[in-house]
Amino acid sequence: MSTYVGAQRVDSQWFVPLVEDPRRPVAVLGMPHAGGGCATFTDCAALLSPRTAMWGLNLPGRQARFGEPVRTDLDGLVAELTGDVRKFADRPYVLFGYCSGALLAFLVARAVRTAGLPAPRALVVASYPPPQFARPPADLHRLDSDGFWTRTILSGGFPAPLAAEPDFRAVFEPALRGDFELLAGFRYVDEPPLDTPVVAITGRADETLRPVQLAPWADQTSAEFTLRVVDADHWVLDNAVDRVADVLDQVSRG
Amino acid sequence: MTRDTRGIRPALLRHLPPGRELSPVTNFFEAGFSSARLVEVLAELRAGGLEVSLIDLYRFPTLQALTTEIDRRTAGASEPRPMPWDA
């Protein structure tokens, strides 16, 4: 999508602006949870200060790119996303990963460093353990449709109002299954910590993750680390979006 | 049952995220509609008598595409079935 950041035109292949005028000084690049699309960050975008523009990762197989084949090669996707981040990197930007999108954001932050690009102002991660402890499901994407949905719904990973639609499997299964296959390919590789500040956000009432489990995100940065525990369950963008927007505004101020 | 597609635009606008705009060709998701928001739109469209499924909003993800598609189906449904000798 061709649009403007600051005075600069950005032809982003991968990110969609979620504010009407994205010519704001700081760009926050949001990467959604498994199965999620660019609109995951809509409500958060609306709460940000006028200095900060939210962009949502627009992966194929869902939402705006429904019907396109999903991406299941993690290294290839990270490389392409990093190529896209280059277009934002001459101005302040923030990487923000939500749930498994945190893993993607982290891998992009590392790849940005390897490529010698300007570092993001911060890496913000929400509702996900640090990569050295992340164990994405290895076999979920191989289950048949009934098994896949039983596991997905039981894990609390799917909203009830959507599951009430008769055709929800046809709408959501390609992206969810594809993302689980993408994540199943993750193997943690040791590298020196980033020199980017990291903020980890987690819900106090998250049944899948206790706040202490996010503490070792600290080992992924040689700069400042902050853990923000908010009043929410796992889905902090649904239950505590104002707090998340506050964090993004704070790190955007630098 | 009314099958008036003129209700689509107001239903979408009622659920449009704050500060966003929706042209006839804006992709719903790029305008900020999440799946949860679209399910709310869907309920209003059905209450207005339109037969729409969730996947329709994904396959025809603009105001223009959705309206055209539903008008097409409605026209198809009201036309008499073709007879063998019409072929």
Image: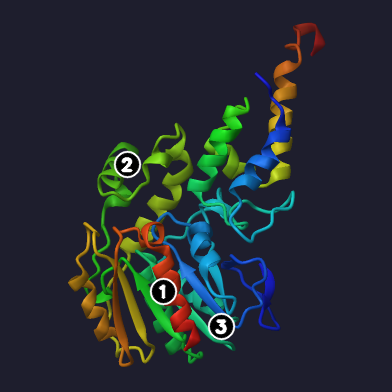
Identify the mark at residue A233; answer none if there is no mark.
Answer: none
Q: Nearer the viewer, residue A113 or A130?
A: A130
Identify the mark at residue A86; answer none if there is no mark.
Answer: 3
Q: Is residue A229 visible?
A: yes
Q: Badge 1 local density, few (<14 within 10 Å), some, or many (20+)?
A: many
Are the two marked residues, 2 and 3, in contact with CB atoms closer than 8 angstroms? no
- SS type, badge 2: helix
Are the two marked residues, 1 and 3, in contact with CB atoms closer than 8 angstroms? no
Q: Is residue A230 left or right of residue B55?
A: left
Q: Can residue A56 be seen in this view?
A: no
Q: Tell me the quadrant of the picture where the N terminus of chain A can be found.
A: bottom right
Residue of label 2: A149
Residue B78: percent from the left, percent from the top?
A: 73, 16
Q: Badge 3 local density, few (<14 within 10 Å), some, or many (20+)?
A: some
Seen in the picture, residue A169 relative to A118 is either above or below; the reply is above
- SS type, badge 1: helix
Identify the mark at residue A105; answer none if there is no mark.
Answer: 1
